[in-house]
Protein backbone atom coordinates (compact mmCIF):
# COMPACT_ATOMS: atom_id res chain seq x y z
CA UNK A 1 0.00 0.00 0.00
CA UNK A 2 2.75 2.47 0.90
CA UNK A 3 4.67 1.80 -2.31
CA UNK A 4 1.57 2.25 -4.45
CA UNK A 5 0.66 5.42 -2.57
CA UNK A 6 4.18 6.81 -3.05
CA UNK A 7 4.10 6.15 -6.79
CA UNK A 8 0.58 7.53 -7.21
CA UNK A 9 1.38 10.58 -5.08
CA UNK A 10 4.53 11.36 -7.03
CA UNK A 11 2.67 11.08 -10.33
CA UNK A 12 -0.20 13.26 -9.10
CA UNK A 13 2.17 15.91 -7.73
CA UNK A 14 4.14 15.93 -10.99
CA UNK A 15 0.98 16.38 -13.04
CA UNK A 16 -0.09 19.25 -10.76
CA UNK A 17 3.30 20.95 -11.12
CA UNK A 18 3.34 20.52 -14.89
CA UNK A 19 -0.22 21.78 -15.36
CA UNK A 20 0.30 24.77 -13.06
CA UNK A 21 3.62 25.66 -14.71
CA UNK A 22 2.27 25.41 -18.25
CA UNK A 23 1.78 28.69 -20.03
CA UNK A 24 2.64 28.51 -23.73
CA UNK A 25 5.09 25.78 -22.79
CA UNK A 26 6.92 24.91 -19.62
CA UNK A 27 10.10 26.82 -18.86
CA UNK A 28 12.72 25.70 -16.36
CA UNK A 29 12.46 28.50 -13.82
CA UNK A 30 8.67 28.45 -13.77
CA UNK A 31 8.72 24.66 -13.32
CA UNK A 32 11.09 24.97 -10.35
CA UNK A 33 9.11 27.76 -8.68
CA UNK A 34 5.78 26.00 -9.11
CA UNK A 35 7.38 22.80 -7.81
CA UNK A 36 8.54 24.61 -4.68
CA UNK A 37 5.03 25.98 -4.16
CA UNK A 38 3.35 22.58 -4.63
CA UNK A 39 5.91 21.06 -2.26
CA UNK A 40 5.04 23.62 0.42
CA UNK A 41 1.33 22.94 0.03
CA UNK A 42 1.79 19.17 0.19
CA UNK A 43 4.03 19.45 3.26
CA UNK A 44 1.32 21.51 4.97
CA UNK A 45 -1.34 18.92 4.10
CA UNK A 46 0.95 16.17 5.36
CA UNK A 47 1.56 17.98 8.64
CA UNK A 48 -2.17 18.57 9.08
CA UNK A 49 -2.92 14.87 8.51
CA UNK A 50 -0.25 13.88 11.04
CA UNK A 51 -1.83 16.12 13.68
CA UNK A 52 -5.24 14.51 13.08
CA UNK A 53 -4.06 10.87 13.06
CA UNK A 54 -4.03 8.66 16.14
CA UNK A 55 -0.69 8.50 17.92
CA UNK A 56 0.37 5.05 16.67
CA UNK A 57 -0.35 5.86 13.03
CA UNK A 58 1.37 9.23 13.38
CA UNK A 59 4.48 7.60 14.87
CA UNK A 60 4.61 5.06 12.03
CA UNK A 61 4.16 7.78 9.43
CA UNK A 62 6.81 9.98 11.06
CA UNK A 63 9.29 7.09 11.01
CA UNK A 64 8.61 6.53 7.29
CA UNK A 65 8.83 10.27 6.56
CA UNK A 66 12.36 10.31 7.97
CA UNK A 67 13.47 7.93 5.23
CA UNK A 68 15.72 4.97 5.87
CA UNK A 69 17.00 1.78 4.31
CA UNK A 70 17.01 0.09 7.72
CA UNK A 71 14.93 -3.07 7.80
CA UNK A 72 14.94 -3.44 4.02
CA UNK A 73 15.76 -6.80 2.51
CA UNK A 74 15.76 -8.56 -0.83
CA UNK A 75 11.99 -8.47 -1.02
CA UNK A 76 12.25 -4.66 -1.20
CA UNK A 77 15.23 -4.65 -3.58
CA UNK A 78 13.68 -6.80 -6.31
CA UNK A 79 10.90 -4.33 -7.29
CA UNK A 80 13.42 -1.48 -7.26
CA UNK A 81 15.81 -3.45 -9.47
CA UNK A 82 13.00 -4.24 -11.91
CA UNK A 83 11.94 -0.60 -12.04
CA UNK A 84 15.54 0.49 -12.64
CA UNK A 85 15.91 -2.10 -15.40
CA UNK A 86 12.92 -0.53 -17.16
CA UNK A 87 13.52 3.16 -16.39
CA UNK A 88 17.29 3.62 -16.71
CA UNK A 89 17.39 2.61 -20.39
CA UNK A 90 14.80 5.33 -21.00
CA UNK A 91 17.35 7.87 -19.73
CA UNK A 92 19.86 7.09 -22.47
CA UNK A 93 18.00 8.67 -25.41
CA UNK A 94 17.21 11.70 -23.24
CA UNK A 95 20.82 12.47 -22.33
CA UNK A 96 21.84 14.11 -25.64
CA UNK A 97 18.81 16.41 -25.93
CA UNK A 98 19.12 17.36 -22.27
CA UNK A 99 22.75 18.30 -22.82
CA UNK A 100 21.63 20.59 -25.62
CA UNK A 101 18.93 22.07 -23.39
CA UNK A 102 21.61 23.20 -20.92
CA UNK A 103 22.35 26.00 -23.37
CA UNK A 104 18.78 27.24 -23.12
CA UNK A 105 15.47 26.40 -24.71
CA UNK A 106 15.93 28.68 -27.71
CA UNK A 107 19.37 27.31 -28.59
CA UNK A 108 18.18 23.71 -28.18
CA UNK A 109 15.13 24.37 -30.36
CA UNK A 110 17.39 25.93 -32.99
CA UNK A 111 19.39 22.68 -33.03
CA UNK A 112 16.25 20.68 -33.71
CA UNK A 113 15.46 19.52 -30.19
CA UNK A 114 11.76 19.31 -29.36
CA UNK A 115 12.19 21.03 -26.00
CA UNK A 116 8.71 20.55 -24.55
CA UNK A 117 8.59 16.90 -25.54
CA UNK A 118 12.04 16.15 -24.11
CA UNK A 119 11.23 18.07 -20.93
CA UNK A 120 7.97 16.14 -20.49
CA UNK A 121 9.63 12.77 -21.10
CA UNK A 122 12.51 13.59 -18.76
CA UNK A 123 10.08 14.71 -16.10
CA UNK A 124 8.04 11.50 -16.45
CA UNK A 125 11.13 9.29 -16.13
CA UNK A 126 12.49 11.35 -13.22
CA UNK A 127 9.16 11.20 -11.39
CA UNK A 128 8.99 7.44 -11.85
CA UNK A 129 12.56 7.00 -10.59
CA UNK A 130 11.92 9.26 -7.59
CA UNK A 131 8.63 7.52 -6.87
CA UNK A 132 10.34 4.12 -6.84
CA UNK A 133 13.11 5.42 -4.56
CA UNK A 134 10.56 7.01 -2.22
CA UNK A 135 8.50 3.84 -2.13
CA UNK A 136 11.58 1.84 -1.17
CA UNK A 137 13.28 4.13 1.35
CA UNK A 138 10.92 6.96 2.19
CA UNK A 139 11.61 10.57 1.29
CA UNK A 140 15.30 11.27 1.68
CA UNK A 141 15.23 14.85 0.43
CA UNK A 142 18.89 15.79 0.79
CA UNK A 143 19.94 12.97 -1.54
CA UNK A 144 17.86 14.45 -4.35
CA UNK A 145 19.69 17.74 -3.95
CA UNK A 146 23.20 16.37 -3.58
CA UNK A 147 23.29 13.33 -5.89
CA UNK A 148 23.45 15.22 -9.22
CA UNK A 149 26.09 17.63 -7.94
CA UNK A 150 28.22 14.84 -6.47
CA UNK A 151 27.89 12.79 -9.66
CA UNK A 152 28.99 15.70 -11.82
CA UNK A 153 32.04 16.34 -9.63
CA UNK A 154 33.02 12.67 -9.32
CA UNK A 155 32.71 11.93 -13.04
CA UNK A 156 34.09 15.34 -14.06
CA UNK A 157 31.50 15.39 -16.78
CA UNK A 158 30.35 18.74 -18.14
CA UNK A 159 26.94 17.42 -19.15
CA UNK A 160 23.97 15.72 -17.56
CA UNK A 161 25.05 12.78 -15.40
CA UNK A 162 21.82 10.77 -15.31
CA UNK A 163 23.27 7.31 -14.70
CA UNK A 164 25.95 8.43 -12.22
CA UNK A 165 23.49 10.41 -10.10
CA UNK A 166 21.21 7.40 -9.60
Image (cartoon, rainbow, N blue to C red):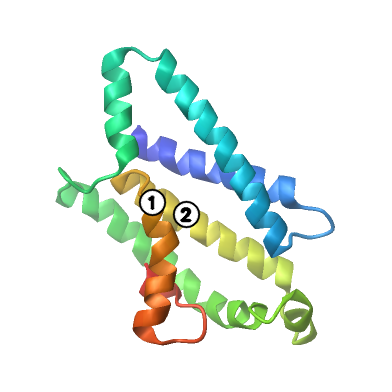
Q: Quadrant of residue 51?
A: top left
Direction from residue 143 to residue 40 in the image, left or right: right
Give above or below for 109 relative to 67: below
Does 29 sit left or right of 129 as displayed? right
User: Residue 24 location, x and y as percent?
Assistant: 84, 58
- Residue 69 horizontal/vertical position (percent): 22, 49
Q: Quadrant of the N terminus?
A: top left
Q: Crowding near pointer 1: few (<14 within 10 Å), some, many (20+)?
A: many
Q: What residue do we see at 56% from left, 57% from top?
A: 124
Residue 35 image position (x, y, % from top left): 61, 49
Q: How many labels sit on residues?
A: 2
Q: Position of residue 157 (x, y in %)?
A: 44, 86
From the image, tell me which residue sits under label 1: 132
The residue tagged with tag 2: helix, strand or loop?
A: helix
Task: State which quarter of the image contains the C terminus.
Answer: bottom left
Q: Nearer the viewer, residue 82 or 122?
A: 122
147 on left or right of 103: left
Q: Nearer the viewer, residue 38 or 88?
A: 38
Q: CA distance from mark 2 to mark 1?
A: 6 Å
Q: Which residue is mark 2?
A: 128
- Asked whether the residues under the numbered discs 2 and 1 touch, taking CB atoms below 8 Å apart as contact, a structural biologist would say yes
Amino acid sequence: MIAGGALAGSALAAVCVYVLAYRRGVHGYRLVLVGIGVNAILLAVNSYLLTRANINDAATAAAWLTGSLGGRGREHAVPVALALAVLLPLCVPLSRPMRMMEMGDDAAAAMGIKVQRVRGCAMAVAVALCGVATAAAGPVAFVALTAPQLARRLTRSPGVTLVASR
